[in-house]
Amino acid sequence: MSTQTTDPMQPGPGPFPAGTAADTPGGPPHTPHPARALRRAAAYEWHHLRGLRATWVLLSVAAVLTVGNGVSLLLVADTDSAPTPATVADALQWAPAATQLPLLALLLIALGTSSVSTDLTRGAARTTWLTAASRTTAFVAKLCVAALLTSATAVVTVLIAGAAGASALAMSGTPQPAWEQTLPALLRFTLVMACWPVLAGSVAALLRNRVWTVLLLVLWPLIIERLTGLLLGRLLGISALHEVLPFAAARAAMADASDTSTDASPAQGLLDNGLGPWTGLMVHVLFALAVAVAGAWAYRRRDGA
């Protein structure tokens, strides 16, 4: 009769793939390098995100609507003069001056909320936690993948809208604007858009409810922040406090500071431009990072459904 021996140095069967670890006692003894673990978790998140039909529907809708953003330059251009840099930047940025935040942000809000909220409410969290090296790695991968996809989408929509706008102006005989003068504002727009899924995913981790997350992120920039800023400004005696709050800072970041002409976009006056563009960007980025830290703390302590 033969007996089977087990080498104590060989890994036994278990729920974790080789080379992974979990935030629980008794995990595998070998933890992968943090960079390798993050790449693996990011690949998992990208595979999950691109497999959702909603992702491609949203991106397709954004591509179609952005053509209208470029063609809309005809509505604000004269036959004898080119649109101002501020007008061009506002159109290519999905009109944040008129809507108080880029319409693209509202369109792509699902990219930031879906992976976190789905994990926590539909039982997918345990699979994610077994795939990633840790919950922190999983959360960072979710935010990074969503931020990169949103940034790439912002760049592509700018290119599509710019091409559509240039073609429309050329066919109408209108002079071309100084496109190069809009580049700094468009760069800041892309960075602001990268912060959007970071905020969405982090708030979803804090609230653990997708509907409340969407409502908060829609109402806060449009209504709540203005009212809160005005109220606190009255109480503290700081009249311009509402101009330096996070989403007002984002609007200031997207403003085209190079355009000082008197016929610049009339909607620019709605931007609450109390900060310089680059200062506004820094304020908004720091705010997004602070919310991300709070979101990571909450995500690590959540239980899967």
Image: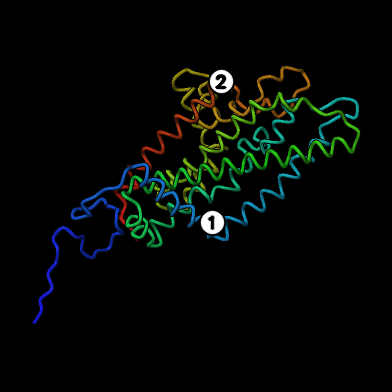
Mark 1, Cα crowd under 10 Å, few <14 / some 14-19 / many 20+, is few
User: Going by the image, does 172 lie left or right of 90?
Assistant: right
**Residue, x 48% and y 50% (percent of image)?**
113
| Most foreground residue, 192 or 224 | 192
Residue type for callout 1: Arg
Disc 2 designates what residue?
Answer: 275
Label at residue 276: none
Quadrant where the N terminus sits is bottom left
For marks 1 and 2 on the same chain, the one whose residue lies earlier in the sequence: 1
Disc 1 designates what residue?
Answer: 50
The relative height of residue 24 versus residue 171 in the rendered view (above or below) is below
* Quadrant housing residue 255: top right
* Quadrant housing residue 256: top right
Q: Secondary structure at mark 2?
A: loop
Q: Position of residue 73 (x, y in %)?
A: 79, 35
Q: Does residue 211 appear in the picture of this structure?
A: no
User: Going by the image, does 182 lie left or right of 220?
Assistant: right
The relative height of residue 98 versus residue 209 in the rendered view (above or below) is above
User: Going by the image, does 90 lie left or right of 234?
Assistant: right
**Residue, x 32% and y 57% (percent of image)?**
130
| Most foreground residue, 96 or 68 | 68
Q: Secondary structure at mark 1?
A: helix
Residues under labels 1 and 2: Cα distance?
Answer: 38 Å
